[in-house]
Image (tube, coloured by chain):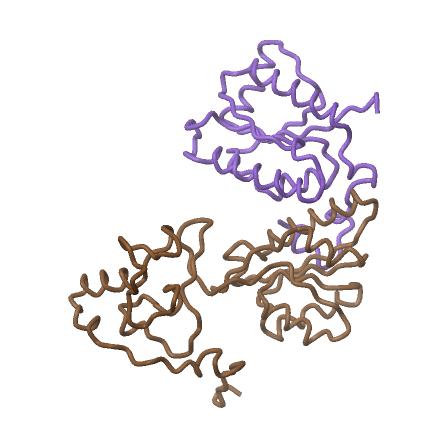
C-alpha cells in the first residue's frame, strides 16, 4: 500500500485558516489501511480543526466525505454536489488523490493533509515499513522475494557492503541488512548459487530515471 | 467564572469503573453530579474520535476509567485506551487546548472509594482549569444529526 502520515496539525491549520467552508476528503484505500486518511481520520481531523478554530474565536463549516478511491476520476466526480459550498478542499489521500482533485476542480484550492511516505507493508499494528520503490524492473525473482532496491540503504544489487554488521545496516541498529536477509532466505531455500550470480548494472530508465512514467493498456481503453 | 460547574464525561469500563461507581453508591459515597458516566464494554472500546468529539461538543473534561494494569477482561483494552488518551492529549496540546482535560484512570471493580475520590479530584481540577474554550463559541453543531450536510451523513453514521 501507499503509506502516509498526517501533517503536523499546525501546518494544516495554516493552510486552511483563511477559509470558512472546507471540504475535507478522505480515501477508503491505502490511507485508510495505514490510518492516515480514512473516514475515522477525516472525522478526527475535522473535530480537531473545529475545536482549534473555535478556540481562535471563529467557526468553520466542514463537510466530510470519504471517497472509495481518490485517485480515480469516477469517484472524485462524487464531490460535484458538495464542491460549490466549499472555499477550499483539504485532502487526506496520498499525493495521487490530491492531484486528482486539483485536476478535476480547477477553480478550487486543494491542500494535502498528509505527507505521502512510501510503498510499504504493515509489520505489526502501528508499524509500516518500506518494501518497494517502484523501480519498474522487479528483481524479487532473483533475490528470494526480498527487495535490495527498497530495503538496502545504498540500493546495492550485489551486497552486502562493508557496513553490514551482525545482520544490521550501518545506518542504524534498527535497520536490517537486506543482503543478510536475502542470503538467509536463499540459504533456507537451498538456492545459495543464486547469490553467487553477479547482477549487472541496473537500467534506471524504467524507474524515475526516465522521467514521469505512464502505463498505457490499449486493450482497456 | 466563580459559578462555573464543569461537565465531565467519564467513559467507564463495565468490568471495573462502572461497577466501582455502583459500589460507591452502595457505600453511600457521594461524588460530584458533574460526572456523566458512559458505560462501555471495555475501556479499549473508547476511540480517539469519542474523546475528541466530547471536547468538540463542549465537555470540559473527559476521562476514561479502565481496569488496573494487567487486569483487563479483554487482555489489553486498558493499555490500548491509555495509548489513545495519550494520543488525544498530544493532539489537544497541538491545537492549544489543555491536555489535562483528558485523563486515563485505572481502578478495580471493588474500588468504590477510589471512584468517588477520582470523580471529586478530576472535577476539582477541571473547575480550576476553567471552561472548555469551545463552549464560548456555543460548541460545535457540525455533527448534530439534525443539522448535517449530505456529505457529512456518512461520517455522522459512525
Residue A122 picture location, percent across and down: 42, 56
Q: Quadrant of residue A181?
A: bottom left
Chain identifier of the brown chain: A
**Residue A118 image offset from top left, x and y in percent:** 49, 64
Q: Quadrant of residue B46?
A: top right
Q: Horizontal placement of B5 versus B79: left or right? A: right
* Residue occupying image coordinates x 83% and y 41%: B137
Residue B157 point in image, percent of width and height: 64, 50
Identify the residue at image location x=39%, y=56%. Answer: A171
Nearer to me, A144 or B144:
A144
User: In the rendering, at what x and y percent does residue A117 appear?
Assistant: 52, 62
The residue most toward the top is B28
Q: Taking A122 as reference, is A73 above or below it?
A: below
Q: Colour of chain B?
A: purple
Left or right of A158, for residue B113: right
User: Residue at horizontal 78%, vertical 54%?
Assistant: A61
Give the farthest residue toward the bottom: A218
Q: Is residue B115 above or below residue A127?
A: above
Left or right? Give the position of A176 relative to A62. Answer: left
Task: Please name whichever residue, A69 or A117, is drawn nearer the observer in this view of the structure.
Answer: A117
Up/down of A129 relative to B117, above or below: below
Q: Residue furthest front?
A: A162
Amino acid at each position: 500500500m501507499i503509506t502516509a502520515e498526517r501533517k503536523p496539525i499546525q501546518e494544516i491549520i495554516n493552510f486552511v485558516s483563511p477559509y470558512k467552508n472546507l471540504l475535507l476528503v478522505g480515501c477508503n484505500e491505502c490511507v485508510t489501511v495505514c490510518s492516515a486518511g480514512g473516514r475515522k481520520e477525516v472525522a478526527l481531523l475535522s473535530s480537531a480543526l473545529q475545536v482549534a478554530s473555535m478556540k481562535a474565536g471563529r467557526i468553520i463549516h466542514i463537510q466530510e466525505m470519504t471517497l472509495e478511491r481518490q485517485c480515480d476520476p469516477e469517484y472524485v466526480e462524487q464531490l460535484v454536489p458538495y464542491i460549490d459550498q466549499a472555499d477550499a478542499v483539504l485532502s487526506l489521500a496520498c499525493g495521487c488523490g490530491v492531484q486528482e482533485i486539483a485536476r478535476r476542480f480547477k477553480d478550487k484550492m486543494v491542500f494535502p493533509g498528509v505527507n505521502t511516505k512510501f510503498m510499504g507493508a504493515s509489520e505489526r499494528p502501528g508499524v509500516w515499513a518500506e518494501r518497494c520503490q517502484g523501480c519498474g524492473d522487479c528483481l524479487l525473482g532473483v533475490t528470494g522475494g526480498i527487495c535490495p532496491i527498497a530495503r538496502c540503504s545504498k540500493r546495492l544489487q550485489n551486497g552486502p557492503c562493508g557496513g553490514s554488521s551482525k545482520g544490521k545496516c550501518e545506518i542504524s541498529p534498527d535497520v536490517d541488512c537486506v543482503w543478510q536477509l536475502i542470503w538467509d532466505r536463499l540459504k533456507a531455500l537451498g538456492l545459495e548459487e543464486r547469490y553467487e550470480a553477479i547482477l549487472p548494472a541496473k537500467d534506471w530508465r524504467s524507474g524515475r530515471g526516465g522521467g514521469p512514467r505512464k502505463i498505457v493498456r490499449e486493450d482497456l481503453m | 467564572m466563580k459559578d462555573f460547574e464543569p461537565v465531565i464525561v467519564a467513559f467507564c469500563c463495565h468490568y471495573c469503573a462502572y461497577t466501582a461507581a455502583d459500589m460507591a453508591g452502595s457505600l453511600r459515597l457521594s461524588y460530584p453530579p458533574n460526572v456523566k458516566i458512559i458505560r462501555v464494554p471495555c475501556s479499549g472500546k473508547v476511540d480517539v474520535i469519542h474523546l475528541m468529539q466530547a471536547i468538540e461538543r463542549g465537555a470540559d473534561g473527559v476521562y476514561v476509567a479502565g481496569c488496573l494494569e494487567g487486569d483487563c477482561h479483554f487482555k489489553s483494552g486498558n493499555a490500548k485506551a491509555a495509548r489513545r488518551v495519550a494520543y488525544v492529549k498530544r493532539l489537544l496540546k497541538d491545537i492549544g487546548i489543555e491536555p489535562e482535560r483528558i485523563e486515563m484512570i485505572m481502578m478495580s471493580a471493588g474500588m468504590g472509594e477510589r471512584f468517588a475520590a477520582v470523580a471529586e479530584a478530576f472535577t476539582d481540577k477541571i473547575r480550576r482549569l476553567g471552561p472548555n474554550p469551545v463552549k464560548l463559541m456555543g460548541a460545535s453543531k457540525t455533527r448534530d444529526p439534525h443539522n448535517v450536510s449530505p456529505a457529512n451523513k456518512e461520517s455522522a453514521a459512525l
